[in-house]
Image (cartoon, rainbow, N blue to C red):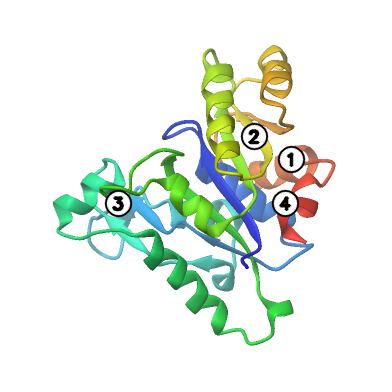
Amino acid sequence: MFRGIFVTGTDTNVGKTVVSAALLARYRAEVRLRYWKPIQTGIRDSGFGIRHDDDTAEVARLSQAREAEIVNSGVRLPDPVSPHLAAQRAGTRITVKTIVATMHEIESRIPNPESRPRWIIEGAGGVLVPINERETMADLMEALDLPVVVAARSSLGTINHTCMTIEVLRRRMLRVAGIVMVGEPNDENRLAIEKYGAAEVIGQMPRFDPLTPDALTHWAASELDRNGVLFVAGLR
């Protein structure tokens, strides 16, 4: 059984990567953590070892992660499209079974179960994004069976998108551990999501300008999951 948190979103480019970095910064002092984004599309190598749109590198930068806190491998595909299509174009195929087997292999290197890290797994796109001709991101989440944090926009439309995401997760019998709203704080939308989605908003993250490790770490320490909901849900 894996332990940790799965970070999904109501859409692509909603803020999952920054939320993942904030979780790493918020909880690393309390528990051993390891971040992994098993599937990433739109990642391109421009030479000299420099990659563009590399979410793993961005999490490492923003959270000031140590090498042991980052799994810097997985499915990496150049086209900025859905995983199933990016894989087809690259002549490969992504499966839930392979990703789960990789996680088991990583954990097997640590013989003492009590020393194994708690995972922060970042998904690609939203819950129903396809990863092959029959499996979606929801199938991966179901296989891993981790509590889920949903990154959601704070702006107009978020009530519908967030509540639909919550409903899909619960139909899969997955626990929604909390919502992080990203953007200009909107208490009316927050209250509506908590009421109609029956899920706790554990943070309202601003759009940082500039987005720096210090700014994110300070916000995470003071504003993210003040009641320690995630620690109880999956990190302890």
**Residue 29, position in %: x, y?**
77, 62
**Residue 1, position in %: x, y?**
63, 68
Is label 2 in a helix, a strand or a loop? strand
Structural crowding at the residue carrying mark 1, measured as other residues with C-alpha within 10 Å and reported as few (<14), some (14–19) or many (≥20): many
- Is tag 1's residue or tag 4's residue first in the polypeptide sequence? 4
Q: CA distance from mark 3 to mark 1?
A: 29 Å
Please say if 169 is above or below 231: above
Q: CA distance from mark 4 to mark 3?
A: 27 Å
Structural crowding at the residue carrying mark 3, measured as other residues with C-alpha within 10 Å and reported as few (<14), some (14–19) or many (≥20): some
Give left or right: position of 37 versus 167.
left
Is label 3 in a helix, a strand or a loop? loop
- Is tag 4's residue or tag 2's residue first in the polypeptide sequence? 4
Place residue 113 in its image quadrant.
bottom right
Give left or right: position of 114 versus 69.
right
Q: Residue at x 77, y 53 (%)?
A: 231
Is label 4 in a helix, a strand or a loop? helix
Q: CA distance from mark 4 to mark 2?
A: 13 Å
Residue carrying label 4: 26
